[in-house]
Image: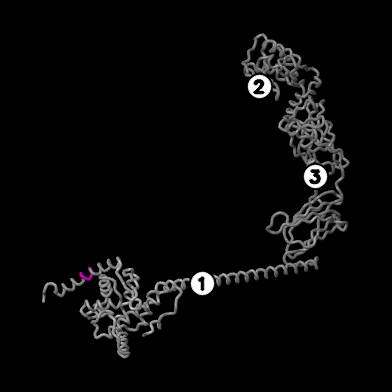
Amino acid sequence: MHDLTANLPPPHDDEPASLRQDIIDELTDHLECATRRELLTGPSSGPCETASDSSDSSFRTAQHRALTRFGNPATIARKLWLDAMQEKLMAQKITLTLAAVATATCVVMCLLMWQALERGQQAQAALLQQNQEFTQTLLQEFRSSQATPTASLIADGWSPLTIKLVSDAGEPVEGKVNVYGTRIGGEGRDMEIVRDVGAEGVVELGMVPYGNYRVAVLATAANETHTEHFMVTPGEPSDRTIVCPTTSPPEVDLKFAFNPPELLESAELHYMVTLNPRARLIGTESWETSEGGFLDLWVDASGQILKQFERSDRIAGVPPGIMGLVFKPAPRLKEYVYDVVVVGVALPIQMDELSSTYRWIDKWAIVPNDRFHPHTVEQPFEPRAGAENLCEQDIPDDVWTEVINDFRMAPQSRQVTIPDGWETVTLTPSGTSGPIELNSRADVLVYFPEDEEDTWKTLLSSAQIIAIESPPAQGFGGEFRYVLLVRPEQKAAIELATHKTIIRLHNSESETDTPVLDESVLEEIKALPDRDEDSKPGF
Amino acid sequence: MDTKLLTGTLEMMMLEVLSQGPSYGYEIVQTVLSRSNGQFELKEGSLYPALHRLERQKLLGSDWSEHEGRRRKYYKLTAAGRKALTARRSEWQSFAQGVNGVLGLDYGIA
């Protein structure tokens, strides 16, 4: 019989267990039937009837003829096996193909990543190499500069800097220098050097980078300072020679003179004067005292400088928020040109009567700035050593008016000596009526009809408030009392007018009444003599 | 018989033989030969790939039985195979009527 398994592929993992045997059994059955048919007499016999025994030659002939009709059974068996396994083989091929593609993709990706890493490592190595070379170069330059610090020509923008301090005569001067530099295009201080300059007058600051520099010099003997700017140029040594003072200016004596009104001449006024010393020229450079700019001086009524003071809101014992003064000994003024910047006036007031709005110290109260208007003068004054230096200050009338108004509130005003030929009259707003208004911030205000102007001027034009008395615990309805300084004849008229309720003193909050004039009183008033301008108190 | 005319009708004839009852490969060949009066003598080797294809298409089912000491595979028509046979038979009739019409066989035209 023909070997049906000759052309079958080798066993496969996915192959059903009975597939090969089924194919062989089916084809074997077919060939057996066909062979038996050939052994019979004709093809018209039954499909697969049992054949009778025959000789071997007849059997082989029948078998051969059956195979001829059938074809190659091994080939057909192979085809049947392949048809049965086609789907599984195809799926396996697809799986293998996909696996191969995935593997290839992974391999390619790994290759690309490896190449990228390789390139990155190469770049890092190159960068590291550059950094090492740069660092080595810097190190070499640094060692080189250390070895030759005074080299006149240094590469890469570093130059030696030397500062010399000399007098007008070229002699060395001792002092101190403070140098700081800023690189070109930089901001702030890139470097700062502070050095003492000895008797040789020279300080070598070593190698500095090029850029803009500022040097502040203190001439120790003169106690004066000077500041200047310069540039350090790459590769060029910088030698700065600065002409310095060798002695400070001589001391001077100084007194002030003020112009208080007559009313305040007997008051113990004090003054605050602020001076600003100007710089002086030494050679072509300006030098200024190292003791600071503005000098705040405390001066008495005679113009004598008593003390120097500073303003401070942090003084032990002073209420919070109150600006006080800290006193120091009077300074020794020197022969500078001074600018008199500000002159102020202080009133003597007892501590227990001070308003919290007053600046205060010890037993002196300073009228607040918004009331006494410090007098700004900007007046130059140039005292000379050995001379009698009198710095006269002409304080304007409007400033004095403010001071007087504040002075009226002070108890000291009651102690003012009444000038000869003058008397006082005390009025209260509720006790009078008429065209008069008392304003504590100004003089007596007079409202009058146009046709009675002269009469009322005669009556009140020279009247001045010299004091405002606080209301006593009892009486006067709790109102302030206004003390007016008037001529004797004016006093009689005012008291008469008050008695006749013609004059009304009222507060600023009160409405102004239309004046009602009594004809008889008006006649008396008109009969009064004209006021004498020369006999007015010196307000 | 021209084998070109046989192309495409082999599966229909196998389904038709099996519609009469279960049968095996050799018997199917002989039945077709007998019922076609010897006109359709199938090449036996090409029968089995066609039977296996129809079986994979679920148009045929199969059972094994023992016969004279040998295993024999019997094929039978499934419900799907019966539907397919009906459809192919209808197609064939339409085709044959068309051809006969052209040839004038059904209307006695010479």
- Label 2: which residue? A508
Q: Is residue A471 above or below residue A3?
A: above
> SS class of the residue under badge 3?
loop
* Image coords of residue A365 (percent x, y): 78, 30
User: Image quadrant for the N terminus of chain A?
Assistant: bottom left
Amino acid type at circle 3 is Gly
The answer to which quarter of the image holds residue A200 is: bottom right
Q: Are marks 1 and 2 on the same chain?
A: yes
Determine if the magenta segment contains residue B92: yes
The answer for how far apart the CA atoms under marks 3 and 1 are is 86 Å
Name the mark nearer the viewer: 3 or 1.
1
Name the mark nearer the viewer: 1 or 2.
1
Q: How many marks?
A: 3
Q: Earlier in the sequence, mark 3 or mark 1?
A: 1
Q: Would you say residue A345 is visible in this rendering?
A: no
In terms of secondary structure, what is the magenta stretch mainly? Answer: helix
Q: Which residues, given as a range, are shown in magenta? A: B90-94
- Label 3: which residue? A292
Asked whether A521 or A113 is in front, the reply is: A113
